Image (spheres, rainbow, N blue to C red):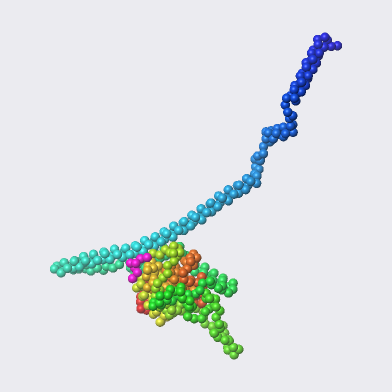
Amino acid sequence: APTKQSQAAVSQVQWLSSGFSSASIASREHDAQACPEIDWERYQDWQWGYSKGLWHSDQPATGEVTAEQQAQRRANLIRTLSRRITGNVKAKTELKDALNQWFIQLSQHLQGLTARVSAIGQKIDEDLQSACDDMLAGLEARSSLSTADQVSHVRSSLGPVWQPPQETAILELAADSLDRSYLDMRALYVATAARDRSCGDTATYPLEATEWRTYASSVEKPTQRTAAPWPSMSTGFTPENIRPVASTEMTTDSPITPAGDRQPSLDWPAAWAKLAEFAAENGADIIGELCVSPEQDAAIPLVHNVDVEEDTVSTSNEAWAAVLAFVGTPDPAMVPAMCGRMQDVLNRLRLCPTALPRVRQGLVLLAQATLGNVLDPFSFAPATCQEWLYPAALLEHGTPLRGYLASSASSSSVVQVLLSQGCPMAQIGEDDADISELL
């Protein structure tokens, strides 16, 4: 049974709870009268938006990449690779330009070295000759056999420091250094021409053929002529792309030539002899006035050496006389020596372009065809100094032309043999005696 004390405690608790509840009811009624009505839905939305980031993050977990991040990474990678590729291409171009400039400077130094050595040697010879003359004048009063022998021995050392073969080798090295960046594309041109012919007819050229022969009494430039540069019938592979009309009509009564009775194929010396005959007949005039192309000057800068101009012209005239003598009495055994002479003339002209207007046209044509730098000698129509001296390099680099240079090999058997077979070239200096027999 509850005691009196426990009953008193329960009554006190009931009294307190009833007092609090009445007070809370009174306070709510007072607040409802004093404050406006609260939008509980808006309050719950605000509370949810404020507290939703406390227990959950919108950032992706480790290892998860959004599409935007992937696109950004891809763009950064592409940008980095683009800069890398551009830098490598620029570095390669700068390296090539630096090498070209280095070869040009090397050619100039070698050329200057040749002229300087020759000048120094002449000065030494003049002083040595003067000393020997003074010595001989002193020996007139008192003769001495040993001294006279010494003077005669000293006089035997007079002469150039470098012999002609050595000087020619230095000039060839200088010309080769100048032309080092322009590789010989002869085999590539022949393969390309053969592939083009195997695919069908030759396409029409956009340029019109011009005549490569000029006349000394005329002021016309080679590029202003419209006549065909070849004296014979068109072959069908000419720039006009005109198919020739058959000059011989086959009848049923005419006998057919057996395969064994056909003419044998040309060898290299025979083909070169035919081309030399063509050059002698059509290239007797000098080159004359030349055009100027800023694009070609920038692509192939020329080195001018006026000191050796007369020597270059004299050497070219001697080579032309040798060509005429060879055409008069062809000798296959002389072809290697003549080829060596052609290379020597071309190297000298490249080192002294100022002598080019005074040189025969046929000589330069024959020299370029000998080295395989001309794909169609019968339509060779250069107009600038670079087109005369570096036709293959201009075609290889795609430099704009002022004249006409064929970009595909001629179908002539002579040209095909010259381009496909090797040139039996002799070294300069070994066959000088044989060449002198032609003069």
- The reply, left or right, for residue 68 in relation to residue 281 is right
The stretch in magenta equals 304-310
Give the quadrant of the N terminus: top right
- Single out the residue that lies furthest toward the front: 33
Considering depth in this image, is 148 or 187 the residue closer to the camera?
A: 187
Horizontal and vertical percent for residue 46? 70, 34
Considering depth in this image, is 8 or 32 the residue closer to the camera?
A: 32
In the depicted structure, whether residue 373 falls above or below residue 77: below
- Single out the residue that lies furthest toward the bottom: 253
Residue at 26 percent of width and 64 percent of height: 124
Horizontal and vertical percent for residue 349? 39, 69
Residue at 49 percent of width and 55 percent of height: 90
In the depicted structure, whether residue 23 falls above or below residue 164: above
Residue at 74 percent of width and 29 percent of height: 37
Horizontal and vertical percent for residue 77? 58, 49
How many numbered badges does the structure rendering display?
0
Residue at 47 percent of width and 80 percent of height: 231
Which image quadrant is residue 66 in? top right
Horizontal and vertical percent for residue 45? 72, 34
Q: Is residue 340 visible to the viewer in this orientation of the structure?
A: no
Q: Is residue 91 visible to the viewer in this orientation of the structure?
A: yes
- Single out the residue that lies furthest toward the right: 1
The overriding secondary structure of the stretch rendered in magenta is helix
- The reply, left or right, for residue 58 in relation to residue 157 is right
Which image quadrant is residue 47 in? top right
Which image quadrant is residue 141 in? bottom left
- Single out the residue that lies furthest toward the left: 141
Considering depth in this image, is 243 or 422 the residue closer to the camera?
A: 243
